[in-house]
Amino acid sequence: MSSARPKSLAAEHLNVVLAKLAGDGAVARDDQLEAVHAIIQPAARVLVVQATGWGKSAVYWAATSALRSVGAGPTLVVSPLLALMRDQVSAAQRAGLRAATVNSTNIDDWDPIFEALDNDELDVLLVSPERLGNPRFAARLDALMARVGLVVIDEAHCISDWGFDFRPDYQRLARALLSTPTASVLATTATANKRVTADVAAQLGASTVTFRGTLARTSLGLSVIPGLSSISRYAWVADALDTIAGSGIIYVLTVAEANRLAGFLQSCGHEVQAYTGQMETEARVHVEELLRANKVKAVVATSALGMGYDKPDLGFCIHVGSPSTPVAYYQQVG
């Protein structure tokens, strides 16, 4: 049986990753070191429930670095959101890891990526649940799962029957990945109440180590503007964009409203773009890049952008209409 790995190994790699991501002198947050140490143990099962911005990705990049240093195979990260995967590839590379993603937008790159995997030239592969069901990728999955050192199930609330965004296909996939006998498995989420946390931990197994922190976001200022008609809401948003600093996201409930509100704001002279799940992937990527570069004042989005988007300097988040649940609201503002 494999022996336990020392905490000093976790500390060494976490310090290096934090310095690369946040600069020299960056200090680990509460439980980050303990989480990395738990993950790098042989065949570990770990659940991390922490608020957005705590540094969950830094934890699995540090764990990947530590595991690779002792001869483990690459890390497989499964994430249900394409926008988040693109952000994560960039973050992994900044952390000093060789990372790539296999998705519907880069089919021409699949063969070189698979070749790099075969030659052990990749540290991290990020995929969507849909890709794992693709026959071309599925044919390689058994061999890959025999080699991986760590499996990361991101947005793990999606595998819980009690989660606000439960996805049965994602749950079935996660259960298949959990069958790996040798790799460690990490599940992460920022939106899990106690019931969802217990359910996900139970799916990971009886030996699961859970790290759960406060989900309160003290950096956020929340307010409600009640009693506005539909027309008044649009006018309020148009006026607000003249005074609110920075660029941000305006969430609406339907595709039709995203296009309608974006058109209205454009007619008022604001640089805005719509973002919906009905848009082609290339168009969505373009809008994400415009927002990240602050080349638009706002993106009017449906929940297609609601699960994850990495923009540290996001100035505001406006909801025109209430999300389906308080947890969905928390996910979007976080």
Image: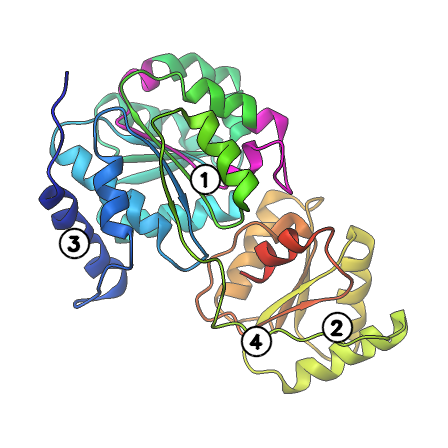
Label 3 sits on residue = 16
* Residue drawn at 17 percent across, 55 percent down: 15
The amino acid type found where label 3 is placed reads: Val
Count neighbours of disc 1 (C-alpha within 10 A) and say few if under 14, some if 14 to 19, many if 20 or more. many
CA gap, disc 4 to disc 2? 27 Å
Is residue 251 rendered to the left or right of residue 38? right
| Amino acid type for the residue under numbered disc 2 | Gln
Query: Which residue position is annotated with label 4?
Result: 221
Q: Name the residue under label 2.
A: 266
Q: Which of marks 3 and 4 is nearer the N terminus?
A: 3
Q: In this view, does 193 lie to the left or right of 262?
A: left
Q: Please say if the residues under marks 4 and 2 sit with CB atoms less than 8 Å apart.
A: no
Query: How far is disc 3 from disc 4 in space, using C-alphas?
Result: 33 Å
Q: Does the magenta stretch include residue 60?
A: no
The amino acid at mark 1 is: Asp
According to the image, label 1 marks what residue?
154
Q: Tell me the magenta residue range.
A: 143-170
